[in-house]
Image (cartoon, grey):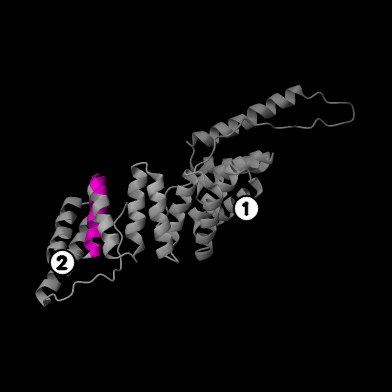
Amino acid sequence: MVFMATRSTNRSPGLTKDKLDEAVSLLKSAHANMQKGNFDRAIVDFKGMLAINKDYAPAHFGLGLAYNEKGDAKKSIKELKRAIELDPDVVQPRTSLALVYLNLDKPKDAERELEGAVEVGKKDTESRFYLANVYYMNGKSDEAVAILKEALKLDPMFSDARYNLGILYMAMGQRSKAIKELLKAIELDPDDIDARRNLAKAYIGQEKYGLAQEQLDIVLLESPKDQEARDLLDDLDKEEKAEQKSVKPKPKAKAIKGKVVKKVAKPKPKAKVKK
């Protein structure tokens, strides 16, 4: 989880100019230390801000992120909850708290926080992306599809959301819709080999083997060590050769080549957005 700037309505009233200058300096230092991975130093900076104003929500938010990076989930949750309590109309602390819960394998708690983030962030795509993942984890595929469609309506160029929508359709057995969304994801991000590999699987499910091989060839061109793509191509080649041997051509008629592949592994949605 990376540090995210947040706009807050929670201010520091009644500060002298010197104290205000000190708070601004600490905020800049905290941001810089978070970006550099100096989380201990960032914690000191955020605590310095809270010494100036103990109810400054962004400082609690920053502390929550820093503690999470340090692996202290208990303190992270405490600070993120305090940030939400002080400024409930900001999306990022709710989303960040949900991700901490996910790391603790608490998808129900994550779902609750993300639903709150979506309610607060009427135009926020990131919270919708994560909520779709959590819905999928919690067995709510229809809800996941609906929330991803909301995210894509807000941002049609959101390639990871487009990819995950395709994966959800595949999991639901709707291959035609999956292919449509994965093609759009590739159009947005031609270097997305995950989208191409899973598009190949969708084509295999529709017995469009030539199109599947085309996508797998591109994957291996970009990533020669992609074992899953190699395995899929090997299956295609082996079954094609076996089918060729088993077919007995009749006079004045061509043998029809058939291809059969083994059951492919169930794809998983992406977990992070590209920012």
Q: Which of the pair 83/192 is nearer the observer?
A: 83
On screen, residue 251 versus residue 225, left or right, reads: right
* Quarter of the image with the C terminus in it: bottom left
Q: Is residue 102 above or below residue 53?
A: above
Q: Secondary structure at mark 2?
A: loop
In terms of secondary structure, what is the magenta stretch mainly? Answer: helix
Find numbered disc 1 in the image and state the secondary structure of the residue it sits on. helix
Kindly indicate the quadrant of the structure image that contains residue 5: bottom left
Foreground residue, 173 or 260?
173
| Residue 193 % position (x, y) | 51, 45
- Write the residue at 26% across / 46% down: 73
On whether residue 68 falls in the magenta region, the answer is yes
Residue 17 locus on image (x, y percent): 12, 77
Give the left or right position of residue 132, taking residue 250 as reference. Answer: left
Please name whichever residue, 17 or 181, is drawn nearer the observer in this view of the structure: 17
- Residue 180 numbered tag: 1
Q: Which region of the structure is painted magenta?
A: 57-74
Q: Amino acid at mark 1?
A: Lys
- The residue tagged 2 is 53
Q: Nearer the viewer, mark 1 or mark 2?
A: 2
Q: Residue at x 25, y 69 (%)?
A: 10
Asked if the magenta segment contains residue 183, the reply would be: no
Taking the spot 38% from the left edge, 54% from the top edge, the residue there is: 113
Write the residue at 81% across / 23% down: 248
Please report whichever mark, 1 or 2, sits nearer to the chain's N-terminal start.
2
- Decide: is 98 above or below 261: below
Q: Is residue 123 left or right of residue 14?
A: right
Residue 9, image x, y percentages = 28, 71
Amino acid type for the residue under numbered disc 2 = Asn
> Crowding near pointer 1: few (<14 within 10 Å), some, many (20+)?
some
Q: What percent of the width, then of the height, locates residue 8?
A: 29, 69
